[in-house]
Image (cartoon, helix red, strand yellow):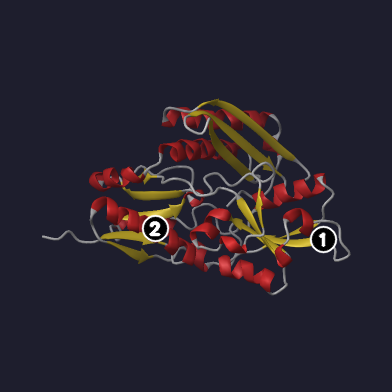
Amino acid sequence: MTERALRLGTRRSKLAMAQSGQVAQAVRQLTGRAVELVEITTYGDTSRESLAQIGGTGVFVTALRDALLRGDVDFAVHSLKDLPTAQPEDLTLAAVPPREDPRDALVARDGLTFDRLAAPSPRGAARIGTGSPRRMAQLNAYARAHGLSIEAVPIRGNVDTRIGYVRSGELDAVVLAAAGLNRLGRTDEVTDFLSVDFVLPAPGQGALAIECAAVNADLAAALAELDDPHTRVAVTAERSLLAALEAGCSAPVGALADLLGDGQVVTEMRLRGVVGTTDGSTLVQLSTTGPVPTSHGDAIALGRELASEMLAKGAAGLMGEREL
């Protein structure tokens, strides 16, 4: 008897469908079973309000998780940065596949890099669109430090909509996650990749999360074959830092855990975190480097430790919109 197709829950956007399609293919090869995509509309997809107004983290996830718990789908694929930091007991984060490029990317008019776009000009400040307070804070801070002139413009919408603002001349540039553009095959539209040395990504940016119901132990075990231990430990540390900062701070948060080594063997992990005001006037940015965590608990402890240092350095006093 042929086993029925596994049902993969996904958002309807082009990006969500692209990354879910890649996971579906990997699961087909892994299990030998057919996988069908089940499109689910989330509240974040239908609301035109800013993400901060409609609840922030979780608005792209709740409908997918509800479908899992009802048994409408067998597993779901999320952009990991969309997941709330608290993991529900009745759901299992079965796999975190190898991470894509975690950087942010600029798509600007006339093929310009960030520094050239934002250089003082008779045209006035460069209008740069982003829906992320985290990006606003760090871009504004960089511009202040280097004598550049930008105006961060809040925007929402899918990749086509955002890049459309540049093509129409309404904006000079937009900032998007490099990973999404890579997965859509649109890297050729990037005019500048923003170094993580001046714009730290959102915790978990570039990584995917594959989730299933906790009671479905056999499926969870099969999906676990897609897990990348290095990516898992890195994003666990980043999300632990975010969770600890959320308890004492509502400002935009960026974080990145880099695995360091000689190219063959990973020997250390560096965790960097930043929190700041959206106008860029104040940033608290710290890092810590140590042995690669060997357990989930060690990664969580590392994130909490750095968050504690950041709070002690004034992060708790920086108020703003939380990263989405």
| Picture coordinates of residue 267, whole percent (x, y) | 50, 27
Is tag 1's residue or tag 2's residue first in the polypeptide sequence? 2
Mark 2: few/some/many CA within 10 Å (<14, 14-19, 20+): few
Q: Is residue 146 above or below residue 244?
A: below
User: SS class of the residue under badge 2?
Assistant: helix
Residue 74 appears in which quarter of the rendering?
bottom left
- Residue 49, horizontal then vertical, whole percent: 60, 65
In the displayed structure, would residue 42 be above or below residue 177? below
Position of residue 108 measured from the top left corner of the image (x, y, whole percent): 70, 63
Q: Is residue 21 left or right of residue 274?
A: left
Q: Residue at x 65, y 49 (%)?
A: 134
Q: Which residue is mark 2?
A: 22
Q: Is residue 119 visible?
A: yes
In terms of secondary structure, where does tag 1 sit? loop
> Label 1 is placed on what type of residue?
Ala
- In this picture, is 175 found above or below 102? below
Q: Where residue 132 appears, x then y in whole percent?
A: 63, 54
Residue 215 in view here:
no
List the single residue furthest toward the right. 122
All told, the count of numbered labels is 2
Extreme residue toward the top, this view: 291
For marks 1 and 2, give the CA distance: 40 Å
Identity, as a three-letter code, of the amino acid under mark 2: Gln
- The residue under label 1 is 125
Front tag of 1 and 2 = 2
The image quadrant of residue 125 is bottom right
